[in-house]
Image: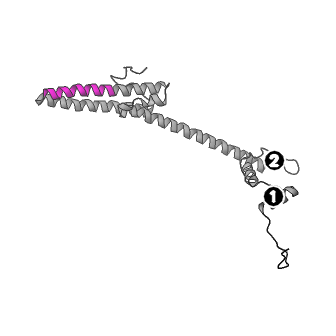
Amino acid sequence: MDEKTGREDVVPPTEDDRGKEAVESGEAIRPNDEKERADAEKHADPPAIAEDADGGVDEGKTDKAEEHKADDEKERMKKADTSAAEEEATRKILFSLCYLWGILFFLPLVMYKDDEDAKMHANEGLNLLLLSIVVNLVLGIITGAAGGTVGVVFGVSIGIFNVAILLLGIYGIVGVVTEKHRPLPVIGSIRLIK
């Protein structure tokens, strides 16, 4: 009671007061209990068979439970298919990079250490790279040293050779994408990576 006004002060209860009252009355609920209970109900498996008041099976509830389980299974299968497809696409891209840019021949070896396909594609990418470097270097030196008409002939031969390397790379990429890979002509039988 307020001594000046003679009225009784009403003070709203604090959190501590509410908590004490709830504990005394047996109704103590933690703040997160309702959320946890809702999450548990949301993720709980529905009963497989529900009985009605007469002890018989309620077909409607059973069908819903089976539908729920079937939907969960479909979702799991869809995720598995998606991840398998993504993994296969990643493999094809990495294997194709061996042929497109020979300097990236090592990528499949890093990603798939003990995979025979990775070793085969990396080997062919390395073969293309080395063949391209060596032949371009030799023909370039001859072109520069010879000059004149002979130089022009060797310059044209460098262009033809580079188109042949490009075609071999495309052949390798098509083999990777279609999964019908055969060794590259001429250089496919050389094994530098074992």
Which residue is located at x 41 percent, y 34 percent? 96
What residue is disc 2 on?
50
Q: Amino acid at mark 1?
A: Gly
Q: Residues within 10 Å of mark 1 (few under 14, many from 20)?
A: some
Q: Is residue 122 highlighted in magenta?
A: no
Q: Quadrant of the C terminus?
A: top left
166 sits to left or right of 67: left
Q: Quadrant of the N terminus?
A: bottom right
- Residue 136, by quadrant, is top left
* SS label for mark 1: helix
Q: Amino acid at mark 2?
A: Ala
Which residue is located at x 75 percent, y 47 percent? 46
Q: In the rendered view, how is the structure colored?
A: one colour
Q: Which residues are magenta?
A: 129-146
Given this view, does label 1 or label 2 mark the residue nearer the observer? Answer: 1
Which residue is located at x 77 percent, y 61 percent? 15
Which residue is located at x 77 percent, y 47 percent? 62
The span from disc 1 to disc 2 (Cα, nearest Å) is 38 Å
What residue is disc 1 on?
19
Front position in the image: 170 or 141:
141
Image coordinates of residue 78 in percent, x first then y, are: 59, 42
* SS label for mark 2: loop
Image coordinates of residue 143 in percent, x first then y, are: 17, 28
Q: Main secondary structure of the magenta part?
A: helix
